[in-house]
Amino acid sequence: MQKHYKIALAGVIIMIVIMIVGKILVRNVKNSTDKNPYELNLDTLGKIPEKYQCYKEVNKIKIDFSCPHGIAFDTGDNIWVSGDSLLLKLNNSGKEISRVYTRSIGFCIAIDKDNKIFIGAENHIEIYSPSGNLLNKWQNIGDSSVITSIALKPDMAYIADAHNNFIYQFGMDGIILNKIGTKDTSDEITRFIIPSYYFDVAVDAEGFLWAANTGMHIMVKFDETGKPQSHWGKASASLDGFCGCCNPSHFAILRDGSFITAEKGIVRVKKYNKNGEFLCALAGSDKFAKNSKGLDIAVDSKQKIYILEPQAKLIHVFQN
């Protein structure tokens, strides 16, 4: 009998201890500003440790533009911004020079060596002179197409279609020469997986095409025929990788072949060498507005980096 009593008493004591500890834990959780202790903090992940920073922000240009989309430079180092059925021309320090009105919204922009301005007008290309004259309008590549990037060579243009997941190779007469990409699910390199409307392309100094296969978190290099040559990149929240559903959203290639990449979600702008090895970071999420995305990138003749932040209507200028 006495043995059973001691067991019962011990059980009561254990229950009391559990209740007290439980109340303490609940109180501590409530005192932690009601935040989920396991919540993924994107702002923390987006902050760049000082030891990895290699560029300084030397200017911040506010633009009078209700909905900017793309940024590019002409041969005179003037800045051009597209969007809103408008092309805004600024000098290198950000002073407005002129405004050119276009027939369509320019969701992306590229400028050739003759300063002809190419804009991606949803499903077709329009070409303008610097004074605003429409020089040409290329064929519609598909009613459902969404053109998100243009890369130019002297005799051809590469047009990225983020809806149909192809890159179209055009001659300068506006005729489609080739279609790069495949629907073959066994091909993990040239089957472009584009979960959102961010699909960037660029041509390097040697004339090779590079494309961001965002759903695969890789950068892919192609020759002129559309044959893949190499690729690099990995999915990772670490600083040397690309995080989220689909990154990098935008990129630019410097004269020495190195890459400047921009990510959305965890907003980061980083630099990789020509082989895809991480070098350093230009900026993290603390440099941009909350939930900023679509950071387009352009490079001037002095290799300064210009980053268009559409939501804030700002151009950030970085120099190393």
Image (cartoon, rainbow, N blue to C red):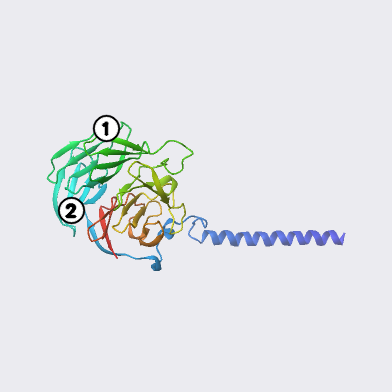
Q: Is residue 228 left or right of residue 27?
A: left
User: Dot 1 corresponds to which residue?
Assistant: 140
- Expressed as whole percent of the image width and height from the top left, the position of residue 298 reads 26, 54
Foreground of the two, 146 or 260: 260
Checking the image for residue 75, the label placed there is 2
Q: Quadrant of residue 119?
A: top left
- Expressed as whole percent of the image width and height from the top left, the position of residue 145 reads 32, 35
- Expressed as whole percent of the image width and height from the top left, the position of residue 78 reads 17, 54
Residue 66 visible from this viewpoint: no
Residue 38 visible from this viewpoint: yes
- Expressed as whole percent of the image width and height from the top left, the position of residue 174 reads 23, 36
Instruction: Determine contact: label 1, label 2, CB under 8 Å.
Output: no
- At 62% from the left and 59% from the top, the residue drawn is 22
Q: Quadrant of residue 83?
A: top left
Element class at badge 2: loop
Quick one: label 2, few (<14), some, or many (20+) residues within 10 Å?
few
Quadrant position of the C terminus in the picture? bottom left
The answer to whether 61 is drawn above or below residue 99 in the figure is below
- At 49% from the left and 39% from the top, the residue drawn is 186
Q: CA distance from mark 1 to mark 2?
A: 28 Å
Q: Earlier in the sequence, mark 1 or mark 2?
A: 2
User: Amino acid under label 1?
Assistant: Asn
User: Amino acid under label 2?
Assistant: Thr
Element class at badge 1: loop
Q: Is residue 300 left or right of residue 224?
A: left
Quadrant position of the N terminus in the picture? bottom right
- At 68% from the left and 62% from the top, the residue drawn is 17
Quick one: label 1, few (<14), some, or many (20+) residues within 10 Å?
some
Q: Nearer the viewer, mark 1 or mark 2?
A: 2
